[in-house]
Every structure is written in C-alpha cells, then in structure tokens.
Amino acid sequence: MIARGSSDEDLARKHVTRLQGLIARWNEDADTYRRTARGTSPATPWMLEEADRTRLAIRDETALCESLIDNLPPGHEMWGELLRVATALDALNVSIAVSAEAMGPRIEQGREIAGLKYLVGELRKDAARQAVPH
C-alpha cells in the first residue's frame, strides 16, 4: 500500500503516464496472442508462457491502480483517469486470457502433428532399409 501524503496526486499522474505506455505495448502483445489463437501465426508453448507472464504483470498493475485510487481523496480528478486505466487493464487481461485458452489446443495439435511427422519419417527410413537387398 502506498502511503497517503501530498505527493499522492503526483505519484498517480506518474503511474498513469507509465501505465498508458504499458497498455499500448500490451495491446500490441494482445494482438499477437489473438492472431496466434486464430491460427494466423504459429502457436508455441513459449507464446502461451509469455501470455501468462503478461497477465501476471497486468494483474500487478491493476492492483497498483486500486491502491492509487484508495490513496486519493474521494472525488479527486485523478480517479477518472485511474479508473479508465484500470478498466483498460481488466479488458486486456480478459482478452489475453481468452487468447491463451484458445492457444492451448493449437499447441497440443502442433505437438501431435510434429509427433506424427517424426513417426512417418522413421517409417519411411525403415521401409527404405528393408527395400535395399542384402
């Protein structure tokens, strides 16, 4: 919890500016996760882990917004901006969660296909060895 004091407003303004930059970057990340979930880019376990890390960071920043709101006096002009930022963070969190959920089956399907390709390759090698006269 951030201590109450005369610098609460300055601290809130500083974090709002920082969070707006993070939201812009995380929106780009969310677009990547959505493309991956839709199948227009490859789904990898790394991508799913990155989506989870992004969601954790967003949750931390949402908690910070709530703390900043709590430390401002009721009706303060920064409340609106902090609430907009917190709402944007919540929307990003939900969007990334939906994309991550859709990535799971695509990643598993990719693993199955890779396994089948390996198996077919081994069968071909075995067939080629057996076709050669001894």
Image (cartoon, rainbow, N blue to C red):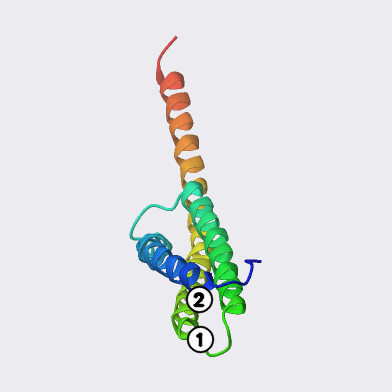
The residue under the point 46% across, 81% down is: 78
Q: Which x, y percent locates residue 125? A: 43, 25
Secondary structure category for the residue under label 2: helix
Q: Nearer the viewer, mark 1 or mark 2?
A: 1
Q: Which x, y percent locates residue 84? A: 45, 81
Residue at the farthest front position? 6
44 above or below 54?
A: above
Q: Nearer the viewer, residue 46 or 104?
A: 46
Residue type at numbered disc 2:
Ala
Q: Nearer the viewer, residue 47 or 9?
A: 9
Q: Which residue is mark 1?
A: 76
Residue at the farthest right position? 1
Q: Nearer the viewer, residue 124 or 19?
A: 19
If the image is split into quadrants, where does the C terminus sit? top left
Which numbered disc flags the more N-terminal residue, 1 or 2?
A: 1
Direction from residue 117 to residue 108 in the image, left or right: right
63 above or below 53?
A: below
96 above or below 84?
A: above
The residue under the point 44% across, 19% down is: 129
Numbered circles on residues, count: 2
Residue at the farthest top position? 134
* Distance of label 1 from label 2 (alpha carbons): 16 Å
Residue type at numbered disc 1:
His
Q: Which residue is mark 2?
A: 86
Q: How many other residues sit within 10 Å of disc 2, few (<14), some (14-19) or many (≥20)?
A: many
Secondary structure category for the residue under label 1: loop
Q: Which x, y percent locates residue 89? A: 48, 72
- In which quarter of the view is residue 124 placed? top left
If the image is split into quadrants, where does the N terminus sit? bottom right
Direction from residue 77 to residue 101 in the image, left or right: right
